[in-house]
Amino acid sequence: MSIDIFIVMVYLAFLLALGWLFRDASASTSDYFRGGGKMLWWMVGSTAFMTALSAMTFTGVMGKALTSGLSIVVIFFANALGYFCNYLFFAAKARQMRIISPIEGIRMRFGKISEQVFTWATVPSSVLQAGLWLNALAIFASAVFDIPISSTIIAAGLVVLLMSLVGGSWAVVASDFLQMIIITVVTFIATLVAIWKSGGVSPILEKGLTAQPFVGDGYSYGYLFVGWFICIFIKQFFSTNNMIDSYRYIAAKDTKNARKAALLACALMIVGPFIWFLPAWYVAGHYPDTSTWGLQSLGSNISDATYFVFVRNEMPLGMIGLMMSAMFAATMSSMDSALNRNAGIFIKNVYEPYMQKTPSEKGLLLASKIATIVFGLLIIAAGLLMSELKGFGLFDALMLVGTLIAFPVLIPSLLCFFIRKTPDWAGWATILVGACVSAVIAFVITPDMVQHVFGLSAPLSAREFAEMKSITMGVVGHVFITGGFFLSTQLFYKEPTGDRAKEINQFFNNVATPVVSEENKESIAMDGKQQQRLGKVLVAAGLALCLLILVPNPLWGRLLYVLMAGIIATIGYFLLRAAKKGFIIAENYK
């Protein structure tokens, strides 16, 4: 067994141990799906950040960087803007809904019919996205380690399933925090090596960027790129600021912690692109001929191995294992959040109100674990199905699913925070209209139609049409048609009465009222418990990394491992110090 495969296996075992560490943290469905609403900002912020990443970040997106120049960075800066809007408004509103499942907010706002429509519109697309992430990881792992794609999908899926099953949301969020630290440290070290070997940042950009540094290759019509640029910001704004994705913040201890979590995610998303893409552009400048990479098994998707080529050729032995662990981390953090959210939605919005015969928290918790198993297996099955599809780029597939399938749900779940006077049917009807818009874009519009409508003198390139279809047309169509329909429903608004009036008033009163945590002995001790457990995990991870100095490497390679281990262990040390201080305060609290 190679050292790299051994490192990945140790990392996966570490995640399973993390789930076991939090096995006693869930006594109710509130604990199991949102940590009882007791989590500190740095834990919530890490999960908000990590749900925006997957293996796609280090495969399809890195491959896109070879031909798209600096424009690929726009996606992450658009995410950063979205998280900043979280900080200003949406994170607070999400926490203040005072819910366990995000669809509970939909029920309060739009009623029971919309609750079910949103449930079955959200969960399948979430399963598809998680399956796509797993497939991207498996394709890459297969090329690197020469193992079957299906084996990687099943192994990674089962690890996430077991971790989420045993530890619930506490294990999910704790693993996201650990994985955020690992990814940040590993990619930071890789970037330092790229800068060191190139003699600075400027040489990397000069050699690695295309003839059109910002736009990249494949664009003949500049205004089409401008449209894509604008639409990316609109799409990511909706993707990060809607009620469905409020699960990022409903676990926060209070409003203040929710807002600070959003600010942490924003800062990480701003810094991330400066770290992630320099190694990719280094490869573009130093290894431009992909036929020499020795990864022909990837076929037309060989550019997805850009980051791997850098690590294999420029980093010390053992770094491939750490890089693959970071990719597993990115994928699993997205998958475990989707898994926990889907199970929570099913239990709180389908099983509890319509299927539970004898109300009991113990029965709900058992059903929650069964739902976790079912959705975990569905995600694995979706990943296996995706692996059979050929001829479609991973990056474009991700964008297409996010824009055409998920986007119609986001419009009413965002606008409903601002627009009160819409009828209950506005929620589900808007989704139906959006589904029709998506169907037309996906199955009717062709490159010839676009060329004719815009009066273009030359046919669209493959990149131009792919990005128009997956982003520009989807965003424009949904914003103006789907969003316009939602706004027009105000013409049919009638003031609700009875229980519906009380429910809607409660919704808007909740989102307008800050959640303020009570500072007492129990809450201080809970904060310390979070810091202590995560501190121990990070110190253990740092000690494990120290063992990599035994791998036969030149001195500079061994020192890199010492540096990584030191950074991770130091963060753990400060968490342990904070926990010790908190326990002392709790003991003396009156």
Image (cartoon, rainbow, N blue to C red):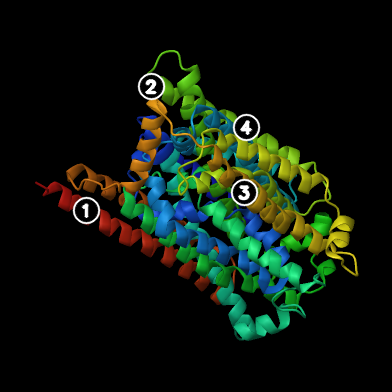
- The quarter holding residue 502 reads top left
Residue 582 against residue 375 in the figure, above or below: below
Name the residue: 72% across, 64% down.
Answer: 64
Q: Nearer the viewer, mark 3 or mark 1?
A: 3
Secondary structure of the residue carrying numbered label 3: helix
Pointer 3 residue: 484
Residue 304, given in percent of the width and then of the height, sits at: 73, 60
In the rendered structure, which disc, 3 or 1, sits on the residue that comes first in sequence?
3
The residue pinned by badge 2 equals 362
Element class at badge 1: helix
Across and down, in percent, residue 538 comes to: 41, 56
- Mark 1 = which residue? 582
Q: Which mark is drawn over residue 314?
A: none
In the image, taking residue 452 as reference, residue 350 lies left or right, namely: left
* Residue 406 in the image, given as x and y percentages of width and height: 63, 45
The amino acid type of the residue labelled 3 equals: Gly
Mark 2 vs mark 1: which is more N-terminal?
A: 2
Rounded to the nearest angstrom, the CA distance separating label 3 from label 2 is 45 Å
Q: Position of residue 376 (x, y in %)?
A: 59, 34
Nearer the observer: mark 2 or 1; the answer is 2
Q: Which residue is mark 4?
A: 377
**Image quadrant assignment for residue 555:** bottom right
Q: Are marks 2 and 4 in contact (CB under 8 Å)?
A: no
Q: As shown in the figure, which amino acid type bears the numbered disc 4?
A: Leu
